[in-house]
Amino acid sequence: MYRVTVRGHAMVAHSLPDEFFGPAQALHGATYVVEATFSGRELDAHGTVIDIGAAGDALGAVLADLNYRNLDEHPAFTGKLSTTEVIAKHIADRLLDGPLTTGLARLDVVLREHPDAWAGYSVDLDESADPAAAGTTGQ
Amino acid sequence: MYRVTVRGHAMVAHSLPDEFFGPAQALHGATYVVEATFSGRELDAHGTVIDIGAAGDALGAVLADLNYRNLDEHPAFTGKLSTTEVIAKHIADRLLDGPLTTGLARLDVVLREHPDAWAGYSVDLDESADPAAAGTTGQ
Amino acid sequence: MYRVTVRGHAMVAHSLPDEFFGPAQALHGATYVVEATFSGRELDAHGTVIDIGAAGDALGAVLADLNYRNLDEHPAFTGKLSTTEVIAKHIADRLLDGPLTTGLARLDVVLREHPDAWAGYSVDLDESADPAAAGTTGQ
Amino acid sequence: MYRVTVRGHAMVAHSLPDEFFGPAQALHGATYVVEATFSGRELDAHGTVIDIGAAGDALGAVLADLNYRNLDEHPAFTGKLSTTEVIAKHIADRLLDGPLTTGLARLDVVLREHPDAWAGYSVDLDESADPAAAGTTGQ
Amino acid sequence: MYRVTVRGHAMVAHSLPDEFFGPAQALHGATYVVEATFSGRELDAHGTVIDIGAAGDALGAVLADLNYRNLDEHPAFTGKLSTTEVIAKHIADRLLDGPLTTGLARLDVVLREHPDAWAGYSVDLDESADPAAAGTTGQ
Amino acid sequence: MYRVTVRGHAMVAHSLPDEFFGPAQALHGATYVVEATFSGRELDAHGTVIDIGAAGDALGAVLADLNYRNLDEHPAFTGKLSTTEVIAKHIADRLLDGPLTTGLARLDVVLREHPDAWAGYSVDLDESADPAAAGTTGQ
């Protein structure tokens, strides 16, 4: 299995209005440093898993839509708690929306929120003809 | 699959009294920077894999029991070589002792001992009703 | 010259309402990873520049007052743009308010806001009998 | 599953003469920071997955053959594009050539080429008596 | 004193044709991760040392001229050994060529070439009305 | 001013037998990741501050004398508390013992002991004809 990872970041505000989250219920913020890993079983004719430039652009476009935003007002998170896990799945789903992951075996997204905590979402793409279903069937 | 990682550290002394270990047979020490990753197939009602505060507290408690200690005199390592792999399994086992990993799919523990070396232990929790047995059946 | 650095972090929301800041005018957020370096010309009787536990506690207290907050509503930044430089000076000033820096030669505060940008504030403490004045006279 | 990782680096020149690679078609270079992870289901009598000294030496020998070289003139890459993925597989194949991975379950090689991009190659060693075939059957 | 740092990188080939450099005499390459730090004694009306966007753009422009290049054929290094120190001074000189450092007190450039080695160049700008002369008079 | 930094590490045991240090009074250990920075006002004929290979070898020799040791029994720390600051000065003094720093302007040594704490020692070498005296006169 081959893997390629591209990294970017987004600086967002949000709140987690559920008493479960203690002080993080208040409006606060985070720099999310985001790593997206694309895995494939074979290399293409160029000796690559994926066009790394296209991968970086795709991640950059997803992050540009989050950067300098208050996620409490972002339509993707309406009625949801924008936990790090939920944001990771959002980023993965947006990457899966495009043509970029066709033919790949797996996509991993990791969000580092501070030096001592990070979270991620992974989806296997092999066994499903319908990428939208992959998140449901899990790993 | 969703994942949450928390990080901590412990500063320990130990020796590895087996000639296999060359100069590390002598009493020396290490700062172990420890990452514990909790994986689950679904998010709970709060949009999380695990209560990250509880995860951090659980890891912190396990590391507090090791920090500022000479592992040669720690009961968990009596009659054992406290290699990085063995310490990683010890930390995972202690995390599995509590309620924290119930319902989760996998636990990974990584110990970074210097910039050019680290080691870890992983256990799949899905296929076993008895978490204590997971270490035996392996991945 | 001897130096000791302690590190912590705070996750804040804020906006920078001046068109100079482009998209950062909007409410967004950041994880600030904060390093405070205390410098002294001599070591004390314990062989240290400063009680590192007290230094960590002092930095932690300053950061706890910022963490999980919207700086737009924090009294320390009323009528000010909470740029990274301004937050760095705020943290240094709060550290200088206590007894911790008495007798020291220099204090440096660095805030890392994302992997490709950071900012800081430094103050020389040697030439002033009045630490409170040091921030005014600068380096 | 237990894992041990050793890290090294190599500083190479190369070109990627295919218009697919845009500006990277030109002769340029990279510092590849290389991580090799050896995984095993059980620990040996020393409480280790592998002799970490031998692992470091093996990785060091593979990297010494690449370091301070122009990969365009290196026999391992004749007639191939030396993409990061291809170099990762080359390093894994060289590690698999020796006795070091006998009895292990998996080998992962990651090459970090700049702070925002890395790539890797992984091979499962369990299910194949013929390591050379592992790359074909994949994960 | 306030400081702002921006970071970028360039992937270059070069050789160091002097027997002093041993194996680095051969054509090889490096990823230089470059940090440029701009220091000023006072903040401007926006609460900043410098327009961080302009700083990032200026560093990016200097690095774009080096990225994916063979420095042996780059006019800036004709007749010179392109050591890390020399490249650091080149980057600083190019940053000093523009209007960006006017009014600042100091510029530092650091190039990280691998995890265990880095080099830099610093220039104090205070005491000279002519920034072009600063590199000559040194710190 | 030009600077070159080399990095290494040592894994040591030690205790800090003074009640000031709380739990660190007990025998414990640390991985010290050590950075030594050599600064000079001018480059030599090779375009370097210092022979980086010789610098790495010198740092490596100093660290080899500490690595896999119990500092409580190391002659350099007899009758002293081996705090991070004291170890930093020890390493700097050993580097100053050799010919390596002749003609240089400054030496900085930093020891990273865990992700949230580090300490260092710096000495200006310019104003003293006798490098051995530099540690006494301080910065």
Image (cartoon, coloured by chain):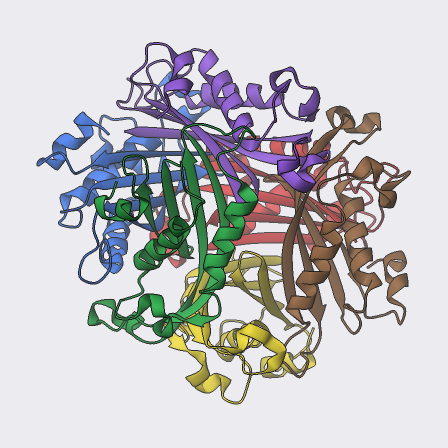
Chain colours: A purple, B green, C brown, D blue, E red, F yellow
Residue F40 horizontal/vertical position (percent): 60, 63
Residue A14 horizontal/vertical position (percent): 68, 30
The image shows residue F42, relative to residue C47, as above or below, that is above
In the shown orientation, is residue C75 left or right of residue E89? right
The residue drawn where x is 27% and y is 44% is: B134
The image shows residue B117, relative to residue C100, as above or below, that is above
Asked if one can make out residue E81 in the rendered structure from this viewpoint, the answer is: no
The residue drawn where x is 22% and y is 44% is: B137
In the shown orientation, is residue D81 left or right of residue B40? left
Asked if one can make out residue C69 in the rendered structure from this viewpoint, the answer is: yes
Residue B108 horizontal/vertical position (percent): 37, 44
| Residue A107 quadrant | top left
The residue drawn where x is 33% and y is 54% is: B89
Q: Residue furthest left?
A: D129
| Residue F124 quadrant | bottom right
| Quadrant where the C terminus of chain D is found in the figure | top left
Q: In the image shown, does B55 or A84 lie closer to the viewer? A: B55
In the shown orientation, is residue B49 left or right of residue E129? left
The image shows residue F127, relative to residue C6, as above or below, that is below
Residue F118 horizontal/vertical position (percent): 58, 63
| Residue C122 quadrant | bottom right
The residue drawn where x is 79% and y is 54% is: E1
The image shows residue A30, relative to residue E118, as above or below, that is above
| Quadrant where the N terminus of chain D is found in the figure | top left
Count of picture labels? 0
Q: In the image shown, does F132 or E21 lie closer to the viewer? A: F132
In the shown orientation, is residue D85 left or right of residue A74? left
